[in-house]
Image: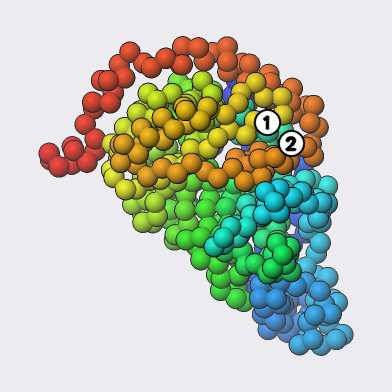
């Protein structure tokens, strides 16, 4: 297996990437950390018959319970011991916040070591979607994101990710929306960069997708994994065999701006990232989503929409879908969402170029629940606000020259696409 290449931490005034966890200590081993064979081996090592692992798994993945009193098919004198060993308490609900007339529920979770993460459960007319976290905090340092400005605390274990799903499933089934609802869609768009916690996220995907007693049996096509641009990990994900949707948080089609908005662009440039996204489409057959937070007078220019359309179409037709997202400002932000007129012009430009485009529904914006803006109110809000303002001011100081279209824009837009080159050859 190839070792994942990670960017060097930047120095100086630019936002600093971080892959170093501030918290230490491993989460206790949980049934959801293990595949079926590993569970059976562990249960046997504890002195129980190995088939008890399958019984525990069915209770966990089918009945969503870890309560020994629910497990009447297990010997009474073994229930407590098995559950204590296989279901340690990893996450505890602190509180819920309700938005969108009760259709969005953001939950604050405290992990076993005191770290904080959030999940967001959203009810739609035809489905329920859960947005989950893969890290406590985030080390990507994007200046418009509250989580990024809070910094990385630590990676979550596979079971800590999976437990967010199970416990939200319990809530959804219990009628938290007024009637029982089944969670059918999952998006890794909460706190953290999922592909920077690759091993745990892949383990969580196995638990989510595989049928009971291995997992929950959720369709891989209903799961989305987002990334700001971990190119080697995108290629690894394509090789995993999961037909999950890849969402690329692009936010700028040009390196001159994206270097400042997305610090990891200092290592993996726009061209490399879009090439990797295209390879993902070709390998999996799954259309890639391009996430684009529209920031007023920053990246919402019509010429940038033209450049984005050119970059996408140059790699083929029908392989991508763009989701423009009205910016949900972080605490202390000096930036705001693009105007409705600029948003419409941006969208119309993409549609005219033949690119499927849908403005993202900004659920939970009144509780910092949209566009990855999670947990700002549970960390030191003043600290986050100061870091956000400082980071954004640093970008503002460098960005004036990037607000104007490059002099060679028409030359760039007139370059032949890969499809045209292939047809000529």
Between 31 and 67, the one nearer to me in the picture: 67
Q: Are marks 2 and 1 in contact (CB under 8 Å)?
A: yes
Residue 401 lies, in percent from the top left, at 46, 11
Q: From what the image shows, is residue 45 above or below residue 90? A: below
Measured in 3D between alpha carbons, the distance from the residue under mark 2 to the one under mark 1, in whole angstroms, is: 8 Å
Marking on residue 376: 2
Image-based side of 16 in relation to 4, left or right: right
Task: Give the residue number, with chain letter if any, for mark 1.
Answer: 330
Residue 197 lies, in percent from the top left, at 61, 47
Image-based side of 392 in relation to 411, left or right: right
Marking on residue 420: none
Residue at the (65%, 21%) spot, across then down: 334
Q: From what the image shows, is residue 101 above or below residue 220? A: above
Q: What element carries label 1?
A: loop
How is colour applied across the structure in the image? rainbow
Q: Badge 1, how many Cα within 10 Å: few under 14, some, many 20+?
A: many
Quadrant location, the C terminus: top left
Q: Quadrant of residue 191?
A: top right
Residue at the (81%, 74%) spot, across then down: 67
Q: Quadrant of residue 217?
A: bottom right
Q: Badge 2, how many Cα within 10 Å: few under 14, some, many 20+?
A: many
Between 339 and 156, the one nearer to me in the picture: 339
Q: Is residue 8 visible?
A: no
Q: From what the image shows, is residue 271 above or below residue 72? A: above
Residue at the (60%, 60%) spot, across then down: 128
- Name which of mark 2 and mark 1 comes first in the sequence: 1
């Amino acid at each position: 297996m190839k070792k994942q290449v990670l960017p060097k931490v930047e120095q100086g005034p630019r936002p600093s990437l971080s892959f170093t966890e501030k918290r230490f200590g491993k989460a206790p081993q949980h049934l959801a950390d293990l595949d079926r064979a590993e569970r059976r081996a562990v249960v046997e090592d504890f002195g129980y018959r190995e088939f008890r692992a399958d019984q525990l798994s069915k209770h966990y993945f089918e009945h969503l319970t870890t309560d020994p009193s629910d497990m009447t098919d297990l010997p009474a004198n073994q229930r407590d011991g098995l559950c204590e060993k296989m279901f340690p308490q990893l996450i505890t609900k602190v509180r819920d916040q309700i938005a969108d007339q009760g259709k969005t529920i953001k939950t604050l979770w405290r992990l076993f070591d005191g770290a904080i993460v959030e999940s967001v459960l959203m009810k739609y007319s035809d489905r329920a979607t859960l947005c989950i976290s893969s890290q406590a905090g985030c080390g990507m340092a994007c200046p418009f994101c509250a989580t990024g400005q809070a910094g990385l605390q630590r990676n979550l274990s596979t079971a800590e990710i999976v437990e967010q799903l199970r416990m939200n499933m319990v809530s959804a089934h219990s009628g938290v929306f007024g009637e029982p609802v089944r969670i059918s869609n999952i998006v890794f768009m909460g706190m953290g960069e999922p592909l920077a916690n690759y091993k745990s996220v892949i383990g969580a995907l196995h638990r989510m997708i595989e049928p009971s007693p291995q997992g929950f049996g959720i369709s891989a096509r209903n799961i989305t994994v987002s990334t700001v641009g971990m190119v080697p990990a995108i290629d690894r994900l394509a090789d995993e065999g999961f037909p999950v949707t890849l969402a690329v948080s692009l936010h700028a089609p040009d390196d001159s701006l994206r270097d400042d908005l997305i610090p990891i662009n200092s290592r993996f440039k726009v061209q490399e990232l879009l090439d990797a996204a295209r390879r993902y489409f070709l390998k999996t057959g799954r259309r890639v989503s391009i996430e684009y937070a529209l920031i007023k007078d920053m990246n919402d220019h019509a010429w940038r929409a033209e450049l984005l359309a050119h970059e996408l179409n140059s790699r083929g037709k029908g392989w991508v879908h763009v989701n423009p997202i009205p910016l949900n400002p972080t605490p202390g932000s000096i930036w705001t969402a693009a105007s409705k007129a600029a948003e419409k012009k941006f969208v119309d430009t993409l549609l005219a170029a033949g690119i499927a485009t849908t403005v993202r529904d900004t659920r939970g914006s009144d509780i910092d629940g949209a566009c990855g803006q999670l947990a700002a109110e549970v960390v030191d809000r003043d600290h986050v606000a100061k870091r956000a303002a400082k980071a954004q001011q640093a970008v503002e100081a460098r960005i004036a020259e990037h607000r104007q279209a490059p002099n060679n824009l028409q030359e760039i837009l007139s370059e032949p696409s890969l499809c045209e080159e292939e047809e000529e050859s």
